[in-house]
Image (tube, rainbow, N blue to C red):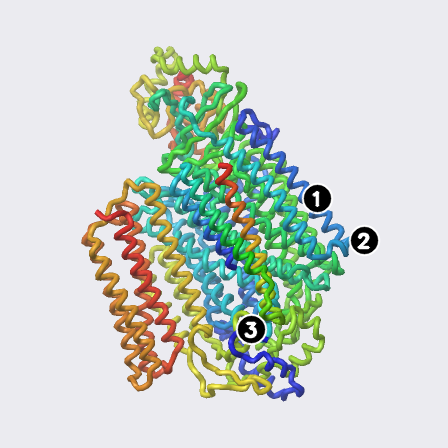
Amino acid sequence: MFSGWPPPILDPAGPYASAISTLSWILFAMAALVLAVVLAALYVALFGRLELQRKLGGKRVIWFGGIAFPLVVLTGLLIYGLSLTRHLTDPITGDELRVRITGEMWWWRVAYLDNEGREVVHDANELHIPAGRPIVLELQSADVIHSFWVPRLSGKLDMVPGRRNLMRIQADRPGVFGGQCAEYCGGPHALMGFTVIAHEPGAFQRLMQSRLNRRRAPAPPAAVAGAQLFEAAGCAACHRIAGTRANGLAGPDLTHVGSRRTLGAGILPNNRGTMMGWIGNSQAIKPNNRMPPYTLLSSDQLTALATYLEAQK
Amino acid sequence: MTSETGFDPRLLERFPTAEARPDSEVDDLNRIWAAPRGWRMVTIVNNNYVGIWYVAAAFLFFLLAGVLALAIRTQLALPLLGVLPQETYNQFFTMHGTLMMFLFAVPIMEAIGVLLLPQMLAARDLPFPRLSAYAFWAYFIGGLCFFASIFVGLAPNGGWFMYPPLTSMTYSPGINADFWLLGIGFIEISAIAGAIEILVGILKTRAPGMTLARMPLFAWAMLVFAGMILIAFPAVILGTLLLELERALNWPFFDSTRGGDPLLWQHLFWFFGHPEVYIIFLPAAGLVSMMVSSLAKTELVGYQLIVLAFLATGFISFGVWAHHMFTTGMPMLSVGFFSAASMAVSIPAGIQVFSWIATLAIGKPVFNTPTLFVIGGLVTFVIGGLTGVMVAMVPFDWQVHDTHFIVAHLHYVLIGGAVFPVFAAFYYWFGMTSRRALSERLGKWIFWLMFAGMHLTFLPMHLTGLMGMPRRVYTYLPGMDWEWTNLLSTAGAFTLAAGVALFLFDIARRFRFTVEDDAGNVYGGGTLEWLPTGLYSSRSIPVVRSRSPLWDNPALSGEVEQGRHFLPNSATGLRETLITSPIRAEPQYLQIMMGPSVWPLLGAVFTAGFFLLLTVQAYTPAIICLPLAILAILRWLWDTDRPVQQAQVDVGAGVMLPTYVTGPSSHGWWAIVCVLVVAFMIFLMAVFGYLFVYGIHPEYWVSPGGQWWALPIVASWAASAVLVLYGWRLLGRDGSSTWSPTAAILFACGFAVTAIAADWFSWRAQGLDPELTAQGAFSHALLALQAQLVAVVVLMGGYLAARTARGLVTRPSNTTFDVVSLFLLYTAAQGSAMALLLRFFPGIG
Amino acid sequence: MSGLLIWAAHFFALYMVASLFPGAALANGLAFAVTVVSLAVAGWLLWVTTRPVEAEPNDVLKRWITTLAAAGNALAFVAIVYQTVPTVLL
């Protein structure tokens, strides 16, 4: 999940992020150098020896320090920066794995696409990818502008209504990487996280296969009550669980909710307790999110629902 | 010697005159320029008063926004705090940004300009004192009401950038967003009024001999500043207008489901928004340039290069707006252009920084409070500039964009580039308006508290951003390692606030408003604002022969005081100032100025009333306010443009100048040209929007049909223009009746109404629905813009007719007549362009 | 100011080219052509403004303004070159 130390921007886990990380260090060095020059000049100007001050106090200094010096530094940076931009935005070839991610207030809809561009596997707030190869993300928005950002894998890219932005990410090794919405999208924008899980290619293949071929397993006995309640309490109006009658599309797809690492779009660890708390009163956890509180449900009912959802792997 | 206007430069040699003038003339000046007392103080229009009110109001908003910042920092001190609930926090950060940018940063620069410029240029006042008063009152009343929305929980909450669709009716159904759109749109109008005042003031009211090469650098900076406002602000005015139309009438400019595009808003907003940063920075750089020279007690090194830097910044800053949009998925090539321009803009900044350092090096700076603030600001600004170069690098921006790294960067730039210089200026120029200077001992405390607080707040914040914390988040989760840097930032914010509080304390203790017996030139500046002054500025207007006249001629103060320079008295017995030519500052004529009046205040009250009542959807009172506002403004204008008896007067040493001039050298002409530039920019931005959405979603567009309609419409406009030109000629020709030129104008107005009506009916006939597609919305918006111009034209026609009836239209030429004619000509040109564009652009079908 | 105005014209021309033909090789070519023209004009202005002013040797202000214009042109020249780097690299 997301952790701030070491700073994720400087702790890249894939080629796109690592190119930017290198650039960052070069920029820090540049800034330190220029700042040192300016501070040294300022020091001499204020406290330096007289003959040094004389040298500093002329138009030549402006031409050298204010024009020539920045010009050299900037030209170098510009050429380097633009080449890097080009390298990072090489044309997309089309045979990469594609995933469509839609920003919603305040969660993420995830759909894995097949070769024809059809949505074949649905999920939310979590993205599984194979390590070692680039993945193309189709970023779009269902309502307002959001921005998709997983700093250890790549820079960010906005999700703009009416547009489809393409972005590439790649993880070199298996791991879990946190991300979050970076464009202010109102209300609980602060609590709109995301998780990317990179697998060994083989493991990823198996995961996708199992999801593609998912048959509705008979609910374990403990979950039967929950399954009935899921329909009776109205959950199915907004949520979908593939293979059941629950087919709501307003909220996150719950077909694989049991296997998710987090709840509430990256803000809570996923276990039975947090699931019960979330269903009972998500407004207390993430104020103003779109899910109504279900304070009328008894704790037994909550347990039943949580047990059922836990089984949705 | 060459001359710009035919004025013989040798006449300037007559000054200073040999003899002192009688003291009774000073009494006359005092009487003529006396400020009303008691409750009538609100009618004051003199820049000494309005300037200080303006500065105080802007500073008040700085404090209010600062309090919001403290609340924000408290909420973020630790994860999951509940100091500010989500909605309140979102309102607070929106208001913090909005107040700081729109109600503090730009107004404080205009305020300092209103306060200092007349003295610096040795003018009696700015050329349109009532306009300054109007701008101030509109800003102050509008700003306070806008701020009050936070107490009732109706403050805008969509961020100071107000990106749709978050701010559209669908996602922000409350009136919070309307407060922003109408409130800020209105305050922008006041900013433009101030900018016109400042621009004309700098170009036309400088002391004789103060050529462009001798102008104080603050005046140079303000000149570029005002020009930039005229170009940049129309973009945001148009943007707010479109968004408000979308919200109120459901016209889809930014709605992608009906062919609009949310990114259009971002283009319009940042086309204003980035120049805005330089609009804030340039005046501060002008102040610093002047202070550095005075504090180091030497002429500035590289004056000319700094002027170049100001001009270059002004230009290049219009090519960097989209660096706020690197992450929106723009075409890579455009991204590259904006990246390159963003880097190029740092070269002028480099010139300024090294010029200041070089000046400090050859001078002998004393470490007093203004010096400390100047140096502190310089260091801070350099750091902000360097992180600015970093984020101009596109891939780096992809990572840090919208994180706290940017928050740190922008505060370094704005605090180092504007706030510290403004505090230095408070200290440096305090002696001009107060009987007692500020305490040096406290000043050093204040500086160190603010400087340390600033860096403690924002230096760790860079790291917070690199650690991945986004902006505009009302809280964060534990376990993300963001606690300690946030805690440091909060501690820093309170340290900074302590410095500001101490400053307030010192102001309360020391500030005693005065114009005559002020504390004076504490820091030994060499420019004209340090001449002995009264409400009329300096007693006589000196001939300027260098950049620091007080240093080069220590006797100057005495000469000016004895009335041995221009205009030692009131030549006509009225308020007046010398109008000079824009490049060489050669005396051209004597302008009669307006005195105190309640009408600018009433005009501002009703204008504010109109906009604010509209916001709270009290439509009837709003509609009542509008004509009242117009009446008040017309009433104040009614007093203007009155020639006096004496056609020529002696302005000192036998130099005779006219008292009434029309045409391109008059200040009224310059002002209306500025207004037309603003109107043109609004139109240009609307056309840009029209083409832009077409480029994004051409599939929503149809050929409107009925192209033949363009013919009668353009013909009407042409007839209108021809009539105006004919009226102009009639006015100059003796023998015709007084009414005939005015009648020509009235007929021209009639044709204008015909043209717009024909345009309107043709669209109704076509059935292009403004709610259905962006094309319909834009066509109607352009029509509405044009209709607005026509409404103004009709008003102007009526006003001109009224003046004609009262025999106020002079022959062979008249400024009011010129103004109305120019406006009509422009309206006709824009109307024709629009009629052709709308009918022929998407293709003939 | 002429030099800076050319920079502005150049900039907006490039922006339009880039927006009208996103991603097309044509855009790069067009942008390059615009640049060559702009550079030629800026260079010519630079040459004009740096020629010694003989007519009015005593007019300090005129010299001052001419020098300012020359420096502006030089800066515009650099800025235009900068502006073109993306067309080569992207």
Q: In the rendered structure, which amino acid carries the disc numbered 2?
A: Arg
* Residue wearing tag 1: A36
Image mark 1: chain: A
Q: CA distance from mark 3 to mark 2?
A: 42 Å
Q: In the rendered structure, which amino acid carries the disc numbered 1?
A: Ala
Q: Is residue B247 above or below residue B620?
A: above
Q: Is residue C41 above or below residue B87?
A: below
Q: CA distance from mark 2 to mark 1?
A: 18 Å
Residue C54, position as x, y percentages in the image: 60, 67
Q: For residue A219, which quarter of the picture?
A: top left
* Residue wearing tag 3: B585
Residue A126 shows in the view: yes
Residue A102, position as x, y percentages in the image: 39, 31
The 10 Å Cα crowd at callout 2, few under 14, some 14 to 19, many 20 or more, is few
Taking depth in this image into account, of B445 and B659 the one nearest to the observer is B659
Left of B489 or right of it: where is B828? left
Asked if badges 3 and 2 are on one and the same chain, I answer no
Which residue is located at x 48 percent, y 73 percent? B43
Task: Name the mark nearer the viewer: 1 or 3.
Answer: 3
Q: In the rendered structure, which amino acid carries the disc numbered 3?
A: Ala
Image mark 3: chain: B
Left of A19 or right of it: where is B560? right
Q: CA distance from mark 1 to mark 3?
A: 43 Å
Label 2 or label 1, whichever comes before in sequence order: 1
Q: Is residue B571 above or below residue B102?
A: below
Taking depth in this image into account, of C81 and B526 the one nearest to the observer is C81
Q: For residue A253, which quarter of the picture?
A: top left
Q: For residue B282, which quarter of the picture?
A: bottom right
Image mark 2: chain: A
* Residue wearing tag 2: A49
